[in-house]
Amino acid sequence: MWVYLAFASALFLGFYEIAKKASLNGNAVIPVLFLNTVFGSLIFLPLAVCSRFLPEQMQHLPFYIPSASAHTHWLIFIKSLLALSSWIFNYFATKHLPMTLAGPVKATQPVVVLLGALLFFGERLNVYQWLGVLMAVLSFYLLSLTGRKEGINFRRDKWVFFLVLSVLTGATSGLYDKYLLRSMDVMTVQSWFNFYQFAVMLPVLMLLWFPFRKKTTPFHWTWHIPLISIFLAIGDFLYFSALTDSDSMISIVSMIRRSNVLVVFLAGAWIYREKNLKSKAFDLILVLIGMIFLYFGSR
């Protein structure tokens, strides 16, 4: 079951990336990210209030948010800082890089997660899973080489550097998720994770963007902004639910989630008319084959 949840999460993560790119085009990054945390918090606020004041009615529902200890809140706060760091780097990179380049580079994140899972969680992959991982890694590498044809120097471009930082912090966040969800409720983690991100982004907005807003890229409203939060909330709920399965493997869940690059590629080709699509399409076939191996290896 956790494999199906991971694939469903990947689909919504792809929609999230499309909404994010549309929101960031010619727009100020920090207020878009701040509003993302606002809408994310608003999604869970009614559930938190109902769980607090109507516990008997909510306890039998999958969206019940149980109370948590101070130690649990501290651990979730750390999770919010890790994820927010990854988001900040990723939002800036997404704004300045083509989707068909940023998506595949971000998709190398499961490789870092795999190394961490082997090191810290003692996970072991079977033959099918190793074939899936190797196919995916090869395809991501080839996609990155194709991206160089678009005039982006991987060694000197600061937005590529931001993307790499996003991958590293995102992988750390993913490993931390597996640690948290061994003992914590999904809704507790997801709801308070959103609340704490809002609490961190509010001073960032007021201190780092608002005083200088007239000297930087102006902010404009677009209805794509709330879609970021909606798609992410659904994708994260499915992702966290997959990790609560005792048989789930963070290395495989993370790799499957990055198959969202297929959705991102189609959007880049159809909506943004990006370049070098033929060579990238071949590489994406390898991604799909890799996901098939992962699926059969995890049944």
Image (cartoon, grey):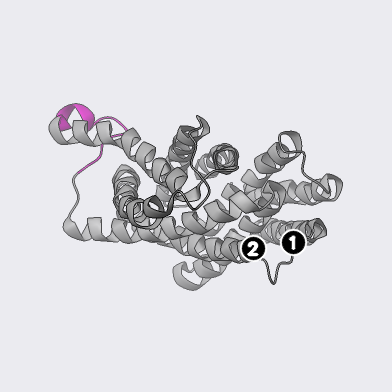
As drawn, is 69 to the left or to the right of 247?
Answer: left
Residue placed at 45% from the left, 67% from the top?
121
The alpha-carbon separation of the residues under discs 1 and 2 comes to 8 Å
Name the residue type under label 2.
Val
Magenta residue check for 96: no
Query: Would you call the spot at circle 1 few (<14 residues within 10 Å), some (14-19), or many (20 or more)?
Result: some
Does the image show residue 153? Answer: yes
Residue designated by label 2 = 160
Measured as percent of width and height from the top left, residue 138 is found at 75, 61
- Pick the residue in front: 252 or 287: 287
Measured as percent of width and height from the top left, residue 76 is found at 30, 56
Q: Is mark 2 on a helix, strand or loop?
A: helix
Measured as percent of width and height from the top left, residue 282 is found at 83, 48
Name the residue type under label 1.
Ile
Which of marks 2 and 1 precedes in the sequence?
1
Does the image show residue 298? Answer: no
Q: Is the magenta stretch mostly helix, strand or loop?
A: loop
The part of the chain drawn in magenta is 54-66
Residue placed at 25% from the left, 60% from the top?
74
- Pick the residue in front: 138 or 146: 146
As drawn, is 198 to the left or to the right of 55?
Answer: right
Please give the label number shown on residue 260: none
Magenta residue check for 61: yes
In which quadrant of the rendered view does residue 133 lie? bottom right
Residue placed at 78% from the left, 46% from the top?
285
Residue designated by label 1 = 152
Measured as percent of width and height from the top left, residue 135 is found at 74, 58
- Which residue is outermost to the right? 278
Query: Would you call the spot at circle 2 few (<14 residues within 10 Å), some (14-19), or many (20 or more)?
Result: many
In which quadrant of the rendered view does residue 183 lie? bottom left
